[in-house]
Amino acid sequence: MGTVLDDSELELFDCINQDMIELTGEAINYYAHDATSIPNRSKVDPLYGEHTELVINGPNRIMAAVKYPEYEPLTEETGFSREWDAKVIISRAHLDEKNLPYPSEADIIEMWRTPYHDRLSMGKGMFFDVIKAKHDGHLNMTPTFTQFELTLKRRTQFGAERRIAPP
């Protein structure tokens, strides 16, 4: 028998977290990179240990809480560009139910496919690179968690949509 609030109540906390995200969040497309070492899948450079070719699985439609992405205009020697920073919270239980891999860096999030946002992204939609993925919603300082918090970045010069476009 556990204490009043410990990780034995994970199912209850997962339900609360998932319901909150489904009620207040919005649908996004989640593209997960396949980092397995199966032949003919993602290729890893033998010297540097980095992926030379990534296999992207998706789109997977899931619910997430999205913090509105604010853009920052950049004027450089190469011209004018924009960068958007955003945060997304995804329920761990939602990923488990759909048998999806947990988010990590190099994944892609697509959201807000509207005429207004298509205009801002030059007709490509709002595709973001996941630059940081961390687990969040720990239950009373235990390693058990209920959600993932993703830090996203969109760049007009190096759009994430280029990695999922067919060759």
Image (spheres, rainbow, N blue to C red):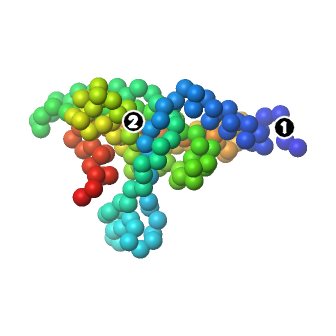
Q: How dense is the environment of label 2, judged by Cα within 10 Å: few (below 14), some, or many (20 and up)?
A: some
Q: Which residue is at the far right? A: 1
* Percent position of residue 79, x then y: 12, 34
From the image, tell me which residue sits under label 2.
Answer: 111
Residue type (three-letter) at the residue carrying disc 2: Met
Q: Which mark is residue 3?
A: 1
* Percent position of residue 48, x then y: 34, 66
Nearest to N terminus: mark 1 or mark 2: 1
Circle 1 SS class: loop
Residue type (three-letter) at the residue carrying disc 1: Thr
Which residue is at the front of the view, 120 or 140?
120
Q: Which residue is at the far bottom? A: 39
* Percent position of residue 109, x then y: 40, 42
Residue 141 vs 54, above or below: the answer is: above
Tell whether 72 sits left or right of 32.
Answer: left
Could you tell me if residue 2 is visible in this image?
yes
